[in-house]
Image (cartoon, rainbow, N blue to C red):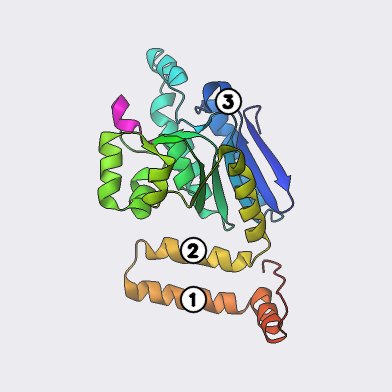
Amino acid sequence: MSDTVRLEQSGAVALVTLDRPEGMNALTVKQKTGLLEAVRTVRDDPSYRALVLTGTGRAFCVGQDLREHAGLLDAGDPAPLSTVREHYNPLVTMLAELPIPTIAAINGSAAGAGLGLACALDLRVGATGARYTTAFTGIGLTADSGLSWTLPRLVGTGRATALLLLAEPFSAEQALEMGLLNAVVEPEQVLPVALELATRLAAGPTAAYAFVKESLAYSATSTLVDALAKEDELQTRAGRTQDHAAAVRSFLAKEPPTFVGR
């Protein structure tokens, strides 16, 4: 990875940590590249059956590093204007398409692309007292890191429009109420709760989880008829897995199932 992104394995769980606390995990080119490498490693290694993304220090991630961004703009470097295409788009796509459960352990503040990364994951656990903002319009920019797609699906179009246009801060408790977070816990409990949830999911039917994620992604841009056809296709594939056959036998035997992920 890099010295600002760490990838660790806890059983079958990949723990990816943004580790630049002195900069509130604002995303430099180096950190974005390291994060892409970490997620690609997880994607390509079948020993990982769940992923947790977190940060160190008082912030999860406050988005683009504006100091680096401004310096490159002043130097006439084209990199700032291509980072969406080169970094954020592939990163968000890769995170969203991982066939394993993914959880954001949002240890502190999240803004801009940091919020976008969290919203690209399946579940989100946030810390009490943390603040969130979309941030983009405050610096004359529009949404990136997938927020134009993920945010309306999490909180509804009306709220997403207000959050993106006004860029006003909101609390973890407000994020929970609007459906952006799945749980809010004390800061010291964020990572343990997320890891416990990830460990539980990693022991589950990860092949079925992958089909659920594929079904939801497909239905977001399809008609009901097409979504029903996709459900039929995926249910047929799920029904042929070892996990399904073994789980049915375990159910009939009144025993807890053991899932292998295929």
Instruction: Residue 53 in the image: state x and y as whole percent.
Output: 58, 43
Q: Are marks 1 and 3 in contact (CB under 8 Å)?
A: no
Looking at the rendered structure, the kind of residue marked 1 is Glu
Q: Which of pointers 1 and 3 indicates the residue nearer the eye?
A: 3
Query: Is-magenta flag for residue 79?
Result: no
Amino acid type of the residue tagged 2 in the rendering: Glu
Q: Which quadrant of the figure contains the N terminus?
A: top right
Q: Is residue 257 above or below residue 194?
A: below
Badge 2 is on which residue? 214
Judge the density around disc 2: few (<14), some (14-19), many (≥20) Cα neighbours within 10 Å. some
- Asked if the residue under mark 2 is in contact with the one under mark 1, i.e. CB atoms within 8 Å, the reply is no
Q: Which numbered tag is attached to residue 21? A: 3
- Judge from the rendering whether residue 225 lies leftward or rightward of residue 194; answer left or right: left
Spot occupied by residue 182 in the image (x, y as percentages of width and height): 48, 52
Range covered by the magenta-colored residues: 133-140
Q: What's the CA distance linking mark 1 and mark 3? A: 45 Å
Percent across and percent down for residue 234 are 51, 73
x%, y% of residue 133? 37, 35
